[in-house]
Structures are given as structure tokens and as C-alpha cells.
Amino acid sequence: MLIVYKTGAIRVTPKFTRMLVAGMIGVLVLMLGNLVISIFGSHDGGPLRNGGPLAIVFSLVCIGLAAFSFLLDFDAADQMIRAGAPEKAAWGVALGLTVTLVWLYLEILRLLSYFQQR
């Protein structure tokens, strides 16, 4: 994604940011709904995490969102450099990159676990 960002193939515009944040909020709402379903009804982790076709599609969407989140992180780092932010502020961007990397890693592992169960 760094190559995609540096070449400008995908630009981080305010519209792109709004769409990505809306997608993340949507995923959060669906995950909370799935948590409620798994607590009060389903014993297999809910429909979004049980390994079925819907769970696979949901994981692919989450992987896509996590990958595109890197673009936001790279843009934030680029803007901080251009603005001449002090080095003490770099930890915020580093934390964002780390959280995105862990999210992507966990979603890929979750997707692979669905195929391992079959």
C-alpha cells in the first residue's frame, strides 16, 4: 500500500476518508450486533464469525478496510512531515500504523482459520 500511496494511484481525499471511516463504523456496528447475537442466542460465535460464507465475505471486507487504512496512516505521516511537526508527535502515527498492522494480521489469520476448519 505504500507503493500505491507514493505513486498516487489512490489519493487520500476527504471523500475517501469519509467513506473509509463510514465503513469502519459499519463494521464496528456489525461486530457489536454479532457480539449480542453470540451472547444471547447463537453458540457458534454468531453469523459473522462462525466460518460460513457470510463470515468469509465479512473477513474479506475487514481485510480490505484494514489495507486501505494504511493509506490514511501514510497520509497522516506525510502531513506531519510537511507541517514540520516535532519528533515527539511521531508516536501517534507509529501507534496508528501498529494498530492497523495488528488488525490486518488478525483478520488474515481469522480468514485462514475458516479455511482450515473446512
Image: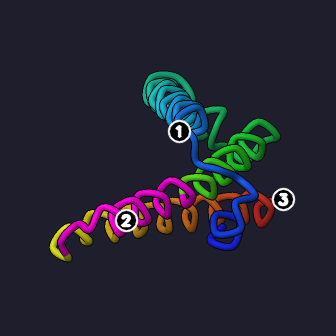
Residue at (58, 31) in percent of width and height: 15
Q: Earlier in the sequence, mark 2 or mark 1?
A: 1
Q: Earlier in the sequence, mark 3 or mark 2?
A: 2
Q: Looking at the picture, which amino acid does disc 1 mark?
A: Thr
Instruction: Report the residue marked by disc 3.
Output: 118
Nearest the camera: 38 or 2? 2
Instruction: Report the residue marked by disc 2.
Output: 82
At mark 2, the secondary structure is helix
The answer to whether any part of residue 57 appears in the image is: yes
Please tell me whether the stretch drawn in magenta is mainly helix, strand or loop.
helix
Where residue 67 appears, x then y in whole percent? 63, 58
Nearest the camera: 88 or 45? 88
Q: Which tag is nearer the camera, tag 3 or tag 1?
A: 1
At mark 1, the secondary structure is helix
Residue at (62, 43) in percent of width and height: 49
Where residue 64 appears, x then y in whole percent? 68, 51
The CA distance from mark 3 to mark 1 is 36 Å
Tell me the crowding category of disc 3: few under 14, some 14 to 19, or many 20 or more residues within 10 angstroms, Cα based.
few
The quadrant of the rendering that contains the N terminus is bottom right
Nearest the camera: 65 or 112? 65
At mark 3, the secondary structure is loop
Q: Which tag is nearer the camera, tag 3 or tag 2?
A: 2
Span shown in magenta = 70-86
The CA distance from mark 3 to mark 2 is 49 Å
Q: Which tag is nearer the camera, tag 2 or tag 1?
A: 2
Q: Looking at the picture, which amino acid does disc 3 mark?
A: Arg
